[in-house]
Image (cartoon, rainbow, N blue to C red):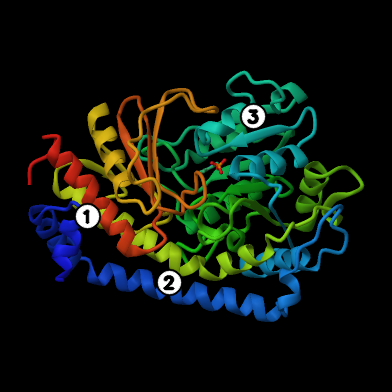
Amino acid sequence: MEINAMYENLGISKKVLDFGKKIEDSLKDRFQEIDENAEYNQMKVIKAMQDNRVSDIHFAATTGYGYNDLGRDTLEDVYASVFHTESALVRPNLISGTHALSIALSGNLRPGDELLSPAGKPYDTLEEVIGIRESTGSLKEYGVIYRQVDLLPNGTFDYESIKKAINERTKLVTIQRSKGYDTRPTFSVSQIGELIAFVKEIKPDVICMVDNCYGEFVERMEPSDVGADMIVGSLIKNPGGGLAPIGGYIAGKTECIDKASYRLTAPGLGKEVGASLGLNQAFYQGLFLSPTVVAGALKGAVFAANVYEKLGFQVVPNGSESRHDIIQAVTFGNPEGVIAFCQGIQAAAPVDSFVSPEPWDMPGYDAPVIMAAGAFVQGSSIELSADGPIKPPYAVYFQGGLTWYHAKLGILMSLQKLLDAGLVQI
Ligand SMILES: *Cc1c(COP(=O)(O)O)cnc(C)c1O
């Protein structure tokens, strides 16, 4: 059977295929650049594994307290090598990105300290962690003060106001690399480096933490290469490579990581405990695959940007900009577009392709959210997924794809659904 017939079997019309083909043909140079970065990062990961003498004994399961869990300790050393940090905490009991960020913050802040976000409002779920929205157990309840400096209208840092906001109580600066559910640009590693240098010049001992979710392996450098004291992320996003079934990481200065570990387990216990329960092999293997998986996801994001830009929708990043995370935002301007797009992504999935996603009130978010995810790991967003809060500007956030071919199918299917619903014309 011809390849077109394979797509038609899956429900993609000739019209959509032809439209997609033209766009794909125009992206050869972009894709080559993505592949070259993946190659670089693949070598980085292999070198880190070799330098730390990773061996099959590290894949053995531990139970109970998990004392002397060699696999866990070596995995943390591998992460530290990949990210060029002194130390790392990489655990299945960091149950999500939000949890890892919450542990990094609460482990390193004390009552009376001030937390500063110089890059505007942080990710939705952090609002409750910090206490921006009233929440039981927030940092605010523990006497941590929060301050925020919004980005300038053009999406860059407001250095003047940041300088004014830093004071004797400022203990930790949190910088979110990815746009999250926002339409601001994602920051490049070098922009983050400039911001960190600026902050450190004013106050050298301030801890600079970067929420690195969705950014790992997109560039050749990470925020830890440009002065971040801690970088934090989720293993069901980029660095888990689609194989990690759970987990989060915090990598950075030993002092910061130790403090986080005392919060994750208990004062006095720290990194010494925490059984890995047989998950180590998936963590190692997922990290090994991550650079190429991220490359597939990036190709999907670039393809989606170009498809929807061509159709006249606002896309962030735009079709030709350089990329600093794997997320693609497409603004439809109405709920129907968001819903049809997500239903297309769902219909292209290997798992649960037969269900149709609907908006619902997800914990941690302030508007109904629609999520499309036909994933092997529940909620995994390195797998092909799309979500969007049902509120203006009605933007959908698309990310992931364990392979480029699957990402491509998902985007073509989303376009098919929009076409079928009469929401676009091609
Ligand atoms: C996903 C994400 C988080 C939260 O991670 P969860 O694993 O969903 O809890 C935090 N910050 C950013 C920028 C994210 O993309």
Q: Are marks 2 and 3 in contact (CB under 8 Å)?
A: no
The picture places residue 69, in percent across and down from the top left corner, at: 82, 63
Give, as a three-letter code, the residue at label 1: Leu
Q: Which residue is mark 1?
A: 10
Task: Quote the CA–CA distance across marks 2 and 3.
Answer: 35 Å
Q: Is residue 167 above or below residue 75?
A: above
Q: Where, by quadrant of the figure, is residue 29 drawn?
A: bottom left
Residue 122 numbered tag? none
Q: Secondary structure at mark 1?
A: loop
Q: Is residue 287 left or right of residue 219?
A: right
Which quadrant is home to the N terminus? bottom left
Number of marks? 3
Taking depth in this image into account, of 374 and 329 the one nearest to the observer is 374
Q: Secondary structure at mark 2?
A: helix
Residue 37 numbered tag? 2
The picture places residue 104, in percent across and down from the top left corner, at: 70, 44
Task: Quote the CA–CA distance across marks 3 and 1.
Answer: 45 Å
